[in-house]
Amino acid sequence: MLDATLRFENLMTAAVTLAVFVCCVSLHYEASIRLSRHIETSKRSLRWRFLVLMSGIFVTHVAEIWLFAGGAALLLHVPAAGNFTGGEPRHFLDLVYVSTMAYSSLGYDKLSPEGPIRFLFGTEGLLGFMMITWSASLTFLKMQNHWAV
C-alpha cells in the first residue's frame, strides 16, 4: 500500500530539491546571459571567445553538480531522508561523484541512493539533461552566428 503521509523527511527532501533546482536554473540563466554577451561584445579572437564560452559552460555545470551534492550532504543529516546502498559516502567528493553520475544521466556505480533522497537525484538527472541541452543550444546558436559556412 502507498504511504501518502507527509513526513518531515519527505517535506525536507522536497524543500531541499526545490531550493537546489531554483539555484541551478538561476545560475545557468545568469551564466548563459553573461557568456552570450561576452561572445557578442568581446574584441578578442573568435577562438578565445569560444574558449571562454566553453570554459564558462563547464564551470557552470560543475557548480550545479556541487550544489546538488551539497543538497545531498544536507539531507544526509536527516537520518530518515535516505542513504546509499553500497556503503556510505566517506567524503564530500563521493557525493560529488554520485551527483555527477545523476546530472549527466550516466547512472550509478557502487553508491546508489535509497529512500526519499532519491527524489533529489531523480530531479537532478532531469535537470542535468535540460541544462546540458540548454548549453548545447547556446553553443550551437553562437557558432551559427559567428562561423561562416
Image (cartoon, rainbow, N blue to C red):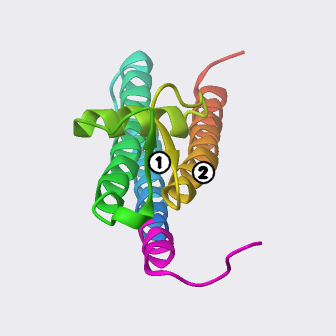
Return the disc, 1 or 2, that comes first in the chain's sequence.
Answer: 1
Residue at the spot 60% in from the left edge and 51% down from the top edge? 122
Disc 2, SS? helix
Give the image location of residue 44, x and y in percent: 33, 25
Q: Magenta segment range? A: 1-16
Give the image location of residue 21, x and y in percent: 49, 62
Label 1 sits on residue: 32
In which image quadrant can residue 131 be found?
Answer: top right
**Quarter placement of the N terminus:** bottom right
Give the image location of residue 80, x and y in percent: 41, 66
Q: Amino acid at mark 2?
A: Gly
Residue at the spot 27% in from the left edge and 62% down from the top edge? 77
Residue at the spot 32% in from the left edge and 33% down from the top edge? 94
Label 2 sits on residue: 122
Q: Nearer the viewer, residue 43 or 13?
A: 13
User: Eyeballing the image, is 134 above or below 147?
Assistant: below
In which image quadrant can residue 89 be found?
Answer: top left
Camera-side mark, 1 or 2 = 2
Q: Amino acid at mark 1?
A: Ser
Disc 1, SS? helix
**Quarter placement of the C terminus:** top right
Q: Nearer the viewer, residue 87 or 52?
A: 87
Q: How far, Cα to Cα, is label 1 from label 2?
A: 24 Å
144 sits to left or right of 35: right
59 sits to left or right of 25: left
